Image (cartoon, helix red, strand yellow):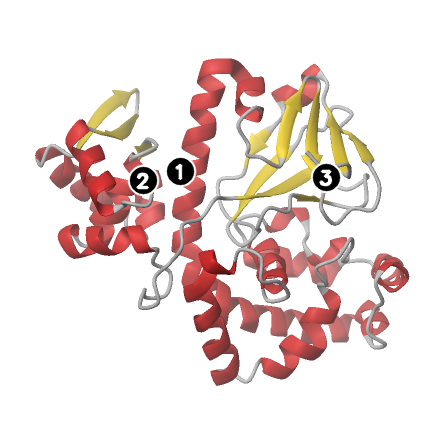
Amino acid sequence: MGDDMLRIHFSDTDLARTRIAAAPDPLWEVASSLHRLQSRRGRWAYAGWYRMARQQTRERGLGRVLRSVFLPLYPRAAYFPDFLTPADAVGDLDAGLESILATPPRRVLKEVTILDRTVGAPAWAGQLARLEARKEFVGMLRAYHDAVIAPYEEQAQSRIEAERASRARGLLDGGVEGMLSGLGPMLRWRPPVLEVVYPKQVEDRNLYLNGRGLTLVPSYFNWGEPVAFADPEMPPVLWYSLLHEPSPPDAPHGVDAPEKSLITLLGRARAVALRAASTGATTGEIARAAGVSASSASRHATVLRDAGLITTIRNGPTVLHTLTPAGASLLRAASPME
């Protein structure tokens, strides 16, 4: 691991209060997507998204906003303002935008000053301390999100459901420490400290949770760059990267290469359901991943079960769907790169 490290210190209470977010953080995905536009790292994994983003920003007249507003405020650097990614935005764009509007002017000015001192802030950035300026900015954020993030929300949700199922298996096998031990190559659990490689950081940093616990937020557009709030007094949140497969040149928006043959064979909703079951999924999780109602998800699961592709285990009021050997073989055949 590299020399620049964020060390997150846990107590027993912190371990008990650690959780993994159930949905993407839309404002963090906005920030990460802007970082993707500033780097060629991992571009192969987002090829379809890059094409869509260029087209959408051009068609919706967002090019100037992207260049003169967003990229200067969200530099792919050691710092960008914490208030742009509020902790309560996980799974709720409206709540996140309201938090930006509610940010105290003094805090806005403080964080803009840090940005200016760190990498340079645009001359107009201090105007965001004014509520009217933040309202205009929030409108721009919503337009950008709707144009280039929303088309990938379903895909991001599906990947997060799979990640949560994988972490749940770690939890069952080894408790919270087992869950923390498999978070990817940039994070290493050395009890009682989670060591996080921090590529953008200029020196080592320690974060003491002090009984607050930690919220882990898997991010679709983050590429190998775990990030926590710069301010240690903020709610402890760590955004970390999901792994990706490349998408082919003709892939439709929001669809990875491995999904295409499954969609042709099974239909989109059942293909999503089958892939969700690869790491274990409840009917509700399948419904969210596929963007259908719970009753529709149940019907799709029944069809897959009757076809011998999944099996279902009931645990009280919930059921868990997992792959049968036939279902696993079908996924492997449809995903030769995996």
**Location of mark 2 (residue):** 276
Q: Quadrant of residue 61?
A: bottom right
Q: Are marks 3 and 2 in contact (CB under 8 Å)?
A: no
Disc 3 to disc 2, C-alpha distance? 30 Å
What type is the residue that disc 2 sits on?
A: Ala
Circle 1: element type: helix
Q: Is residue 17 left or right of residue 173?
A: right
Q: Is residue 5 left or right of residue 255?
A: right
User: Label 1: few (<14), some or many (≥20) within 10 Å?
Assistant: many
**Location of mark 1 (residue):** 162
Disc 1 to disc 2, C-alpha distance? 6 Å
Residue 26 visible from this viewpoint: yes
Mark 3 or 2: the one toward you: 2
User: Label 2: few (<14), some or many (≥20) within 10 Å?
Assistant: many
What type is the residue that disc 1 sits on?
A: Ala
Q: Quadrant of residue 41?
A: bottom right
Q: Which mark is on residue 235? A: 3
Query: Residue 140: x and y, percent?
Result: 62, 74
The residue depicted at 76 percent of the width and 75 percent of the height is 133
Q: Is residue 62 left or right of residue 10?
A: left
Circle 2: element type: helix
Q: Are marks 1 and 2 in contact (CB under 8 Å)?
A: yes
